[in-house]
Image: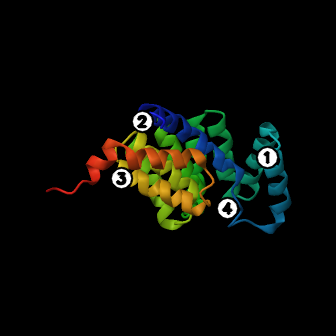
Amino acid sequence: MIPYIKIIGIAYLTTFIIACSSTGSVAKNENGSSRYSSDFKSAVAAMQSGDMESAKIALEALTQNAPNYTGPWTNLGIIYAGQRDYTTAEKYFNEALKRQAKNTIAMNWLGYLSAVKEDYQSASAWYLRAIAIEPQYAEAHLNLAMIYEANMRRPKEALEHYRIYQSQTGGRNTLVSAWIRNLEEGSSYLASNREVE
């Protein structure tokens, strides 16, 4: 069995990795004009190929030419978060939310940015907000579970969200399976779930 401390350390570090892994599903243009869809696709292709500077230029142009697109704002936030320019990233995610109040990708990333600032209450609030809109958003469940376990000492809630994540992703993540086992077997989980005699 992996020691509890080691799992917490991995969970803490992985919080940031998991948030970044959600970039695999770049934001879509839900409110934009089809006139600019090919420009957006080109920007996304540049982003996915790792050419972030070209992607930024194209996405910035889209924020000017088609300001109601939510995708360019969100993807600019993702790029800047990946470059650790968190202030600029936050600005873009908030702009995305102004255009699409139910942009769960932006919410997930704002949770990540809050976690970077060690504001775990805000981080959990962003993840819960995203889950309320999109209950099947597996990454938000995982991020929330890790915050609950590693930073907020809420093992019962962490376990619940780890299980939801595993259910939604087919249980393929063996590391999360280990975290679940650890919580189920750990004294902190047992103590927090023991009925008062």
Image height of 95 relative to 34, above or below: above
Q: Label 1: few (<14), some or many (≥20) within 10 Å?
A: some
| Mark positioned earlier in the residue sequence (1 or 4) | 1
| Residue pointed to by mark 2 | 4
Q: Which is more N-terminal, label 1 or label 2?
A: 2
The residue at which mark 3 appears reads as: 156
Q: Is residue 110 visible?
A: no
Q: Is residue 30 left or right of residue 135?
A: right
Q: Which residue is mark 4?
A: 68
Whether label 2 touches label 1, CB < 8 Å: no
Gap in Å between the C-alphas at discs 4 and 2? Answer: 47 Å
Which residue is drawn at the image coordinates 65% and 52% (left, top)?
74
Coordinates of residue 22 in the picture (x, y in percent): 64, 50
Work out which quarter of the rendered image holds the C terminus and state it.
bottom left
Cα–Cα gap, marks 4 and 3: 41 Å
Task: Tell me the residue that label 1 is attached to.
Answer: 48
